[in-house]
Amino acid sequence: MKLFVKELPNHYNENISFQGFVDKIRDLQYVQFMILRDSTGKVQVTIEKNEENKKLNEIVSSITLESTVKVEGKLLESPSVKMGGMEIIPSDIIVTSKSLNELPFDYKSKDNSLRETRLDYRFIDLRREENNLFFKCETLFEHAFREYCINNGFMEIHSPKIGKKAAESGAEVFKLDYFGQEATLSQSPQFYKQMAMASGFDKVFEIGPAFRAENSHTSYHATEINMADIEISWIDSVEEVMDMEEKVLKYALSKVKEKYGEEIKKHFKSEIGDLSVKFPRITFKEAKEILKEKYHYIGEKEEDFERKEEMLLCKYAKEKYNSDFIFVTKFPFSARPFYHMLDENGLTESYDLLYRGVEITTGAQREHRVDILEKQMIEKEINPRELDYYLDFFKYGCPPHGGYAIGIARIMMQTFNIDNIREATFIYRGPTRLNP
C-alpha cells in the first residue's frame, strides 16, 4: 500500500514502503540523511554508515537530487527529528528514476529564475510547495462551487466546445476546419446555458474551458481559460443573479479559508477577507462619479472601465464597506452583448463583479423575448439569420433567466495575491506560448 507523508504518523514501529522525490541529502562522516518529498510533506530517511549498510550508503552517495526512490524500512517516532518528529530506518532503497545532475533552474528559488524559463519547465516549477498548495486550493474551490450547486438543485451540463458561430465576438475566435466546414472553438457556453433554460432545466452550471483569440499580453489574459458558469430561470431581476453569485462565492471561499487559510497566509502572505460582509452594489454611473469626485480620475473608456478604475473602485469598497468585492451594475448597451436585457432607460440589466482590483465576473439578466433579441441583434449589426439556431431557442417559450461566468484563474490569483495569470494556471496558453 502506498503511504503518503501525511499518513505516516499512523504507522509508527511498522515496516513500511514509501516513495518520493529526493529533496535533500546530507552525507556526514558517520551518518547519511535523505529527505524525501511527496505532495503532502517531507520525511527523513536515516542511514548509518557501516559495513551492513554499505550498499545503501553507496546508493545515497551516488543519487542526485530530484531523483525518485522507493524506500523499504521501519518507521520510528523520533521527537528529536525536527521534520515531523519521525524517521525511516531503511532496509532497502530502490532508485526508480534518476534525475540529471543539474536542473535547468533552481525551482526552490522562484525569484532567482526567469518566469519564461519556469514556464518552459513548468513540470519542475510546479514542484514548489506553494504551487502544490495553490492547486489543492483551486481543487477545493471548484469542488465547493459544484457542491453548492448540487445542494441547491442545479444540473451540471457539458456544452460543446466546437461550434459554428461565436457567442460574443466573431473577431476573437479560433477558427478550424471541421470536415470541410468552418468552425470555431467556444468562447463561452452562453448560448447553450440559455438553451438549457428553454429546455426547462431551471438551474444549470458548468465548469470547463473557453477559448479567446485575443492577442493580449497582459497579466490577466490567456487564450485558454477555465470558467465556472451558472444560469437560472424564473427570475424577476438581475438582483437575483447577484444574490446567488454572492452566496456561491462565499460558500466556496469559506471552504478554502477553513481548510487552507493558515497555509495561504504563510506561503502567499495573503488572507481571505471577511466573508460575512455583504458585497456592495453601485451603478456604472455612480462608479464613474466616485472615480471622478473621490479619486479625481477620469478613464479613457467612457462606456467601460480600465484596470486603474477597477483598482480604485475596489479600494473604495474596502475603505467604505470593508469588502474585497463590489458589484457594478447598469452598463451601457454599447459595452455589452446583444443578449443582455435592457431597462426602461436603455441600460443593460447586467453587472461586473470586481475583486481586489480585477473584474472576475460579467453577469446579467438575459433577453428571452425573440422579437426583442432580433431587434438588439440588428442594433449590434448582427444578421439574425446567422444565428437562427440560437433564436430558435426562444420561439417556443422560454422563462426569464440570467446568469454569469467566473474566470477561475482570476479569482484564484486575486485570492492568493499573485501578480500574473501565468502563475495561476496549470499550463498557460497565450499568444506566444504553445509549449509545453
Image (cartoon, helix red, strand yellow):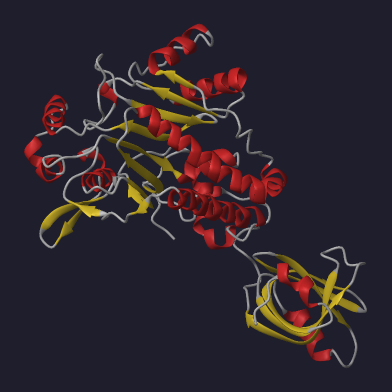
Q: Nearer the viewer, residue 115 or 2?
A: 2
Q: Nearer the viewer, residue 371 or 336?
A: 371
**Residue 251 on image: x %, y %:** 54, 43
Q: Nearer the viewer, residue 349 or 27?
A: 349
Residue sitting at the far top:
293
Q: Quadrant of residue 340?
A: top left
**Residue 400 on image: x %, y %:** 25, 34
Residue 112 visible in the shown view:
no
Instruction: Count the labels in the image.
Output: 0
Instruction: Please determine whether, in this image, residue 117 is positioned above or below residue 391.
Output: below
| Quadrant of the frame with the C terminus | bottom left
Residue sitting at the far left:
385
Instruction: Please determine whether, in this image, residue 354 is positioned above or below residue 38.
Output: above
Instruction: Please determine whether, in this image, residue 257 is positioned above or below residue 88.
Output: above
| Quadrant of the frame with the N terminus | bottom right
Left or right: 54, with 413 as reference point: right
Rendered residue at 32%/44% (across/down): 212
Q: Quadrant of residue 385?
A: top left
**Residue 67 on image: x %, y %:** 65, 74
Residue 57 visible in the shown view:
yes
Rendered residue at 53%/50% (across/down): 141
**Residue 173 on image: x %, y %:** 25, 45
Left or right: 140, with 85 as reference point: left
Left or right: 90, with 20 as reference point: right
Left or right: 18, with 46 as reference point: left
Q: Nearer the viewer, residue 266 or 214?
A: 266
Rendered residue at 62%/73% (across/down): 100
